[in-house]
Image (cartoon, grey):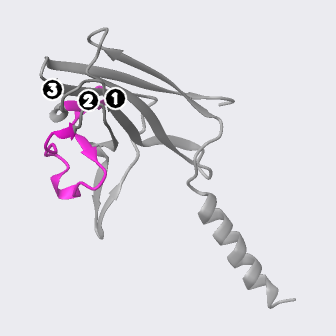
Amino acid sequence: MKKLIPVFLLMVCVLIVSCASTPSSKTNFDIQIEYESDNPAVTIQIVPNWIKNLVFKEGAFSDFTCVFTNNTEKTVQVVWAESSVNYNGSSYVPLLEGQKYEDAQNPMPPAAIPKEGTISKKVMSSNQFQTTNTGWRLSPSESPVVNLLFMIKSDAGEEYITASVKTIIAGE
């Protein structure tokens, strides 16, 4: 019986660690998207990625999966240098999945969307990277509302898409 105690403790530790950071089933989102025109060059779908720590019962946005759809017959661009991630009264450069953390404060070059095509990008805040004594880590943005601003450049000119993502946590 004494031999089973370490195995049991190991199983409990694995269970706690595996459940420490999981998506919350009680979290919903109110996503409001505004376009500057009635016939925008690009439309967007946004899926927030929310992490809820079961041990401390805190939650935060880790990133946003953004799917951009080109509604025109010509290539358009998402201009990251003119786009932003905004929360807690501050504005940050968008950080894209795959971008080096050393370049977090530098916007990526524009992303081209082919005619009638789509692209998908995971967008984070450049402020989410924190340096540690062993390197760096990504910290979720702890704000109940995050506003995303995207600048789209097309043959017709420049237009902005504004998205507001608000968390709605049931039962808390």
Tag 2: amino acid:
Ser
Residue 45 sits in which quadrant?
top left
Above or below 17: residue 88 = above
Please state, as top left, top right, bottom left or bottom right, where the C terminus lies in the image: top right
Residue 153 got which mark?
3
Residue 70 sits in which quadrant?
top left
Q: Nearer the viewer, residue 61 or 88?
A: 61
Distance, label 3 to label 1, CA atoms, is 28 Å
Q: Is residue 99 left or right of residue 64?
A: left
Indicate whether residue 95 is drawn in magenta.
yes
Distance, label 1 to label 2, CA atoms, is 6 Å
User: In the rendered image, which residue does mark 1 sit on?
Assistant: 88
Magenta region: which residues?
Answer: 83-112
Distance, label 3 to label 2, CA atoms, is 24 Å
The answer to whether residue 126 of the structure is visible from this angle is: no
Q: Residues within 10 Å of mark 1 (few under 14, many from 20)?
A: few
Of the two numbered discs 3 and 1 in the rendering, the one whose residue sits closer to the viewer: 3
- Where residue 125 sits: x, y (%)? 29, 41
Task: Identify the secondary structure beneath mark 2.
Answer: strand
- Where residue 131 sits: x, y (%)? 27, 59
User: In the rendered image, which residue does mark 2 sit on?
Assistant: 90
Q: Residue furthest front?
A: 73
Q: Nearer the viewer, residue 58 or 69?
A: 69
Q: Do the CB atoms of the residues marked 1 and 2 lie less than 8 Å apart? A: yes
Residue 124 got which mark?
none
